[in-house]
């Protein structure tokens, strides 16, 4: 059965320096609170995996937590570039960052292969693409049945996967709904899994086949209301578009970024205090 614990204890016990860490969630349910706690505990030399790294990975990279990024798209959605990611790639600040870029279908299939305990994924992709020239993990094999040339990529098997969801019961069975990405596959592919949730309830009252992550697939469940902010949680709160717009200016300058990280994350005890400090700073600006 999954352990119900605090986010601080979960990160301290399950995320280690040098780990391969996947933080998944598509458009909503992005695990910002957990990412902040990783940053707060100053984990180092992480290989970060995410299909669509956005602001949370910009923060982790800029704070020096990452040595490598495996991804299939990167940006501040609706705004533009991730400036801390670009600075790390282009200028090795705050440290060199190795990047391994894939296509969306490729990386999704790599998670599926990891969840299936297979060494690699096979897919029909990359015809006419230059990406295989820049990623030596993308290979081509011949189908033994048809002779067709197919792409093959190594499976993704994180040391730990972190996701955010709407509900858990007291056994650690997870219920999430709305737009789904690869949360299920990323959890099943991982050695350890942490789930932050909006609420823990006595009964999920789930409709048939809705609980795609039963308690035996999860290592730790942590109640963190608002833990997906500034992304949204379907049925709980909306996306804070102003945060994403404001982040562009924060991340452009190294000193501004470092001061923001210190004041909002390193000097706060938890995600709730981060939200309070952020709200105060926004009210002062207005």
Image (cartoon, rainbow, N blue to C red):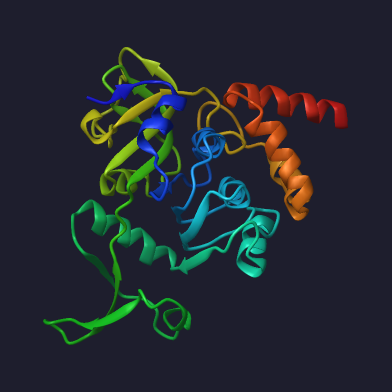
Residue ranking furthest to the top: 202
- Does residue 82 appear left or right of residue 253 in this picture? left
The image shows residue 139, relative to residue 247, as above or below, that is below
- Residue sitting nearer the eye, 131 or 43: 43
- Residue sitting nearer the eye, 237 or 72: 72
- For the N terminus, the quadrant is top left
Q: Residue at x 27, y 49 (%)?
A: 189
Q: Position of residue 148 (x, y in %)?
A: 22, 85
The image shows residue 151, relative to residue 116, as above or below, that is below
Q: Give the quadrant of residue 75.
A: bottom right
Q: Residue at x 29, y 32 (%)?
A: 219
Q: How many marks?
A: 0
Q: Residue at x 55, y 39 (%)?
A: 39
Q: Position of residue 11 (x, y in %)?
A: 42, 33
| Visible residue check, residue 181 | no
Q: Position of residue 98 (x, y in %)?
A: 50, 66
């Amino acid at each position: 059965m999954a352990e119900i614990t605090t986010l601080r204890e979960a990160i301290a016990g399950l995320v280690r320096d040098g780990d391969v860490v996947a933080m998944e969630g598509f458009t909503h349910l992005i695990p910002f609170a957990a990412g902040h706690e990783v940053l707060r505990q100053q984990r180092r030399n992480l290989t970060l995996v995410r299909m669509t790294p956005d602001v949370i990975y910009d923060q982790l990279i800029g704070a020096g937590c990452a040595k490598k990024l495996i991804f299939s798209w990167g940006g501040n959605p609706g705004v533009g570039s991730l400036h801390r990611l670009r600075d790390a790639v282009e200028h090795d600040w705050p440290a060199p960052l190795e990047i391994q870029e894939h296509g969306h279908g490729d990386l999704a299939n790599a998670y599926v292969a990891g969840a299936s305990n297979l060494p690699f994924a096979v897919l029909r992709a990359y015809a006419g693409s230059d990406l295989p020239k820049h990623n030596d993990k993308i290979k081509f094999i011949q189908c033994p049945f048809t002779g067709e040339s197919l792409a093959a990529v190594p499976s993704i098997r994180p040391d730990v996967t972190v996701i955010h969801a709407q509900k858990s019961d007291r056994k650690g069975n997870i219920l999430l709904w709305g737009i789904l990405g690869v949360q299920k596959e990323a959890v099943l592919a991982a050695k350890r899994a942490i789930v932050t949730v909006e609420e823990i309830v006595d009964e999920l009252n789930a409709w048939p086949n809705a609980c795609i992550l039963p308690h035996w697939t999860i290592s730790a469940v942590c109640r963190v209301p608002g833990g997906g902010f500034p992304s949204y949680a379907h049925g709980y709160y909306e996306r804070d578009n102003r945060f994403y717009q404001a982040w562009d200016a924060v991340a452009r300058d190294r000193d501004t970024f470092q001061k923001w990280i210190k004041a909002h994350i390193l000097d706060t005890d938890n995600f709730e205090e981060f939200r309070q400090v952020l709200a105060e700073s926004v009210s002062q600006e207005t």
